[in-house]
Amino acid sequence: MSFNRKIVSSNFVDYVKVCAKSGDGGNGSAHLRREKYVPKGGPDGGDGGRGGHIIVRGNKQMWTLLPLKYRKHVRATDGDNGLKQRASGKQGEDVYLDVPLGTIIKDPETDEAIIEITEEGQEYILSKGGRGGLGNWNFKTATNQTPRYAQEGEEGTEHWRILELKVLADVGLVGFPNAGKSTLLSVVSAAKPEIANYQFTTLVPNLGIVKYRDHKSFVMADIPGIIEGAAEGKGLGVRFLRHIERNSVLLFIVPADADDILAEYHILLEELRKYNPELMDKDRVLAISKSDMLDQELRDEIAKEMKLDIEWMFISALVQEGLMELKDLLWSKFDVE
């Protein structure tokens, strides 16, 4: 079982480092026209072709950087040299690297973000191909009728770049390990995350499309469980905390059998604040999961203690209690017209 689990979890890759080498530009031609009955044809050398670019392109069908994991070096082809009769050389072929939406391209030396790919078909030239050299006909002047030289093509560029994925979702599930996040996602969407009764069952983010009223839908992300000290690197640490940054609404999941529901919520909130204080500006909702275990007396008792400035509710994925109300509440938080 553990062997299969390892294979499944390895499919999600959210960090790769690639070396992108674009193609060199082709040299210009120094050809002189030589034809019968044209004794002084003059220069007719064409320009060299541009070297191929390395281009990153957004693809909404992708959810992982796995295709790039074993492709550390990406190289585009060189442009062809210029030809006679002012014919330009063929351009080098551009290489496209398709990436999921939410991919950030960083400079590994400064760790600064260069660009974020957030739209389908959005393109960014990771490494620009070298320009083709000019043919000798470009250098013909009144005083230099037959230039016997041409321009060399420019060399391509070579860059190391970090590609880092932050999952794009409308709702991010935040909770301790084994709080019931994966179970909730499996019930409200068609996603099939691994579910088991032990901590850190979820090792990678899972995405599911939640169907709503009138054929509407939204995306929910199940983030691996956070533990106290995650911002300092404990448990799975900050590796997956960055995925929460892109979620519009944070849905905190605390199980009904927790020792102290409010304390657990505040620990989770504090971990997010330590990691990135800007997360505090996001809309938050608290769902008390596994509430099918509670009778009305216990619910009333919990309700008296819930002194919070956010909306909260009881839910149970097992008996599907409160799920439609939860969807209504989450939908009301989105900026939709």
Image (cartoon, rainbow, N blue to C red):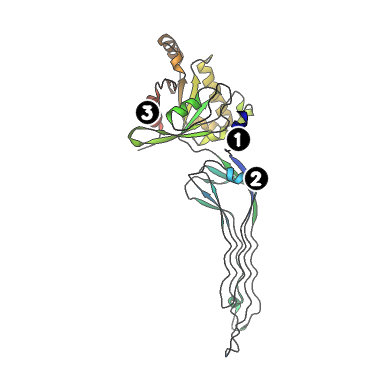
Q: Residue at x 52, y 41 (%)?
A: 63
Rendered-image quadrant of the N terminus? top right
Could you say which disc has been placed on residue 91 in the image?
A: none
The first of marks 3 and 2 along the sequence is 2
The first of marks 3 and 1 along the sequence is 1
Label 3: element kind: helix
Above or below, 189 relative to 144:
above
Horizontal and vertical percent position of residue 286: 46, 23
Above or below, 255 relative to 86:
above
Mark 2 residue type: Pro
Seen from the viewer's position, the closer of residues 211 and 333 is: 211
Tell me the crowding category of disc 3: few under 14, some 14 to 19, or many 20 or more residues within 10 angstroms, Cα based: few
Residue at the limit of the structure toward the top, as seen here: 297
Above or below, 52 relative to 270:
below
Above or below, 240 relative to 318:
below
Location of residue 337 (image quadrant): top left
Do labels 3 and 1 touch, CB within 8 Å? Answer: no
Do labels 3 and 2 touch, CB within 8 Å? Answer: no
Q: Nearer the viewer, mark 1 or mark 2?
A: 1
Query: Seen in the image, is 333 located left or right of residue 199?
Result: left
Q: Residue at x 50, y 47 (%)?
A: 59
Q: Which residue is mark 1?
A: 7
Mark 1 residue type: Ile
Horizontal and vertical percent position of residue 268: 54, 24
Label 2: element kind: loop
Q: Which residue is mark 3?
A: 328
Q: Which residue is mark 2?
A: 108
Query: Seen in the image, is 125 located left or right of residue 282?
Result: right
Horizontal and vertical percent position of residue 282: 47, 31
Q: Residue at x 39, y 28 (%)?
A: 327
Mark 3 residue type: Asp
Query: Seen in the image, is 308 located left or right of residue 129?
Result: left
